[in-house]
Amino acid sequence: MFGSHCKSFHVGRSAQNSLLPAVMAEGGYTSSQGALEAKRGWATVVGTNKPDVLQNLDLWLGTENEDYLAGQSTGRWEILRNSFKPFLCGIVIPPVIDACIQLQAALARGGHSPAQIESVTAQVHPLVLELTGKKTPKDGLEAKFSVYHSGACGLLLGRATHSDYEDNIVLEPALIAIRDRITAKIDTSIAADSVRVTVALENGEVFTKYVEHAVGSRANPLSDAKLQEKFIDGCKSVSIRDAEAVSQRCWELEDVDDMQQFINYL
């Protein structure tokens, strides 16, 4: 599934399915108040262990966690736990990219080039290989689910932008050469937003970088400037003119009286 067209469809469809009920409810569309947790509700129908499913629903829909409440009688809003992704790739890859970008800078300060790299070892959270373990991606879509390509971008280019996941870039010999020197090893002591990357050079020197909370994680959120930089870079792929002005309009959305004005501007 990962690296296929269907995976991208998942994300878009999920966003659509989240918006549709809100729009319908706003228009007065009615349904059962217990569609999820009722005796013949969704959880009971699809769950394999009925008591556990209902108990979990109480956790998610109840008021146990006051930090995430939107009101006195509602459950927590998962969207409030989200952070902005810094890179256009699998959600578990950013720690590796973060570490590799910092290592690329360290190598440059020491007068070394990526061509001198003999091996790279990344100690990663178990989900990294499960979700993004594509060793030899054949196109940009697969590369977004390849911790190896993403790490190579960080080490060779010092970045991992939208253009670095284009089909032709994925097949660049220089990137493939670095990619093939990267080994990812599962370390159960590593958190999902952490990584330890070790670079060994041909001359025997070793550089290690431990990232406790990667950029883009909840503990180390993307700055407004970096978020805007990512947006403007992404605009290049769809030829949006005056991307900086569009970005500024996005920051001002809360003050827009009619969203059609914003859409017309695009």
Image: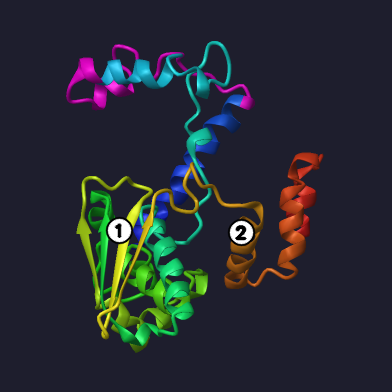
Range of residues picked out in magenta = 26-52
Measuring 37% from the left and 78% from the top, which residue is drawn there? 170
Q: Residue 153's spot in the image, x, y percent?
A: 41, 74
Instruction: Out of 12 and 27, give the one closest to the viewer.
Output: 12
Q: Residue 122's spot in the image, x, y percent?
A: 27, 63
Q: Nearer the viewer, mark 1 or mark 2?
A: 2
Q: Name the secondary structure under disc 1.
A: loop
Figure coloring: rainbow
Q: In this picture, is 142 found above or below 37?
A: below
Q: How many marks?
A: 2
Instruction: Out of 224 and 114, give the one closest to the viewer.
Output: 114
Measuring 48% from the left and 19% from the top, which residue is drawn there? 75
Is residue 165 in sight in this rendering? no
Quarter of the image with the C terminus is: bottom right
Measuring 53% from the left and 20% from the top, which residue is drawn there? 69
Is residue 190 in sight in this rendering? yes
Residue 46 shown in magenta: yes
Residue 131 shown in magenta: no
Measuring 30% from the left and 58% from the top, which residue is drawn there? 2
**Secondary structure that dominates the magenta span:** loop
Around disc 1, counting alpha carbons within 10 Å, would you say few (fewer than 14), some (14 to 19), or many (20 or more)?
A: some
Residue ID for mark 1? 2
Give the quadrant of residue 210.
Answer: bottom left
Q: Amino acid at mark 1?
A: Phe
**Is 115 positioned to the left or the right of 82 in the image?**
left
Residue ID for mark 2? 226
Mark 1 vs 2, N-terminal side: 1
Q: Name the secondary structure under disc 2.
A: helix
Q: Amino acid at mark 2?
A: Lys
State how far apart marks 1 and 2 are (Cα): 27 Å
**Is 72 positioned to the left or the right of 116 in the image?**
right
Q: Residue 10's spot in the image, x, y percent?
A: 39, 50
